Image: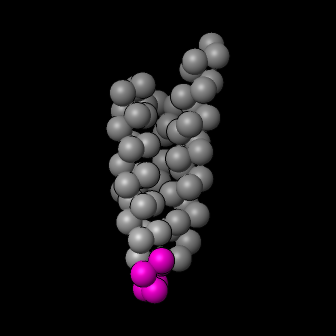
Amino acid sequence: MAIFRARDVSQLSDVELVEQVDKLRMELIQYHGKVSAGGSTENAGRIREIRRTIARMKTEQNRRIQA
């Protein structure tokens, strides 16, 4: 899953935003599962990137609701 920047997020439709947030949350759950099982991820910074991307998308969703 690609990491979206603010410019990319603003160009997505409402439906695409919801779908991407769901996909990223599932990926985050998988990473947390690996870590909690005692394993390590290939890219430790990926969890942080996913969390920040989800936050960007949720911010954009809230911005659209407010407008």
Q: Which residues are magenta?
A: 35-42
Q: Position of residue 58 (x, y in %)?
A: 56, 37
Q: Position of residue 36 (x, y in %)?
A: 48, 77
Would you say the magenta stretch is mainly helix, strand or loop? loop
Q: Looking at the image, which residue is at 41% across and 71% down?
A: 33
Q: Looking at the image, which residue is at 42% across and 52% down?
A: 24
Residue placed furthest toward the top: 67
Quadrant of the rendered image containing residue 18: top left
Q: Nearer the viewer, residue 65 or 29?
A: 29
Q: Looking at the image, which residue is at 43% across and 85% down?
A: 39
Q: Position of residue 22 (x, y in %)?
A: 38, 44
Quadrant of the rendered image containing residue 63: top right
Q: Which quadrant of the rendered structure holds the C terminus?
A: top right
Total residue callouts:
0
Query: Is residue 1 placed above or below 56 in the rendered structure?
Result: below
Q: Looking at the image, which residue is at 60% across and 26% down?
A: 62
Q: Is 66 in the magenta? A: no
Q: Position of residue 25 (x, y in %)?
A: 43, 52
Q: Which quadrant of the rendered structure holds the N terminus?
A: bottom left
Work out whether residue 35 can be spotted: yes
Work out whether residue 7 can be spotted: no
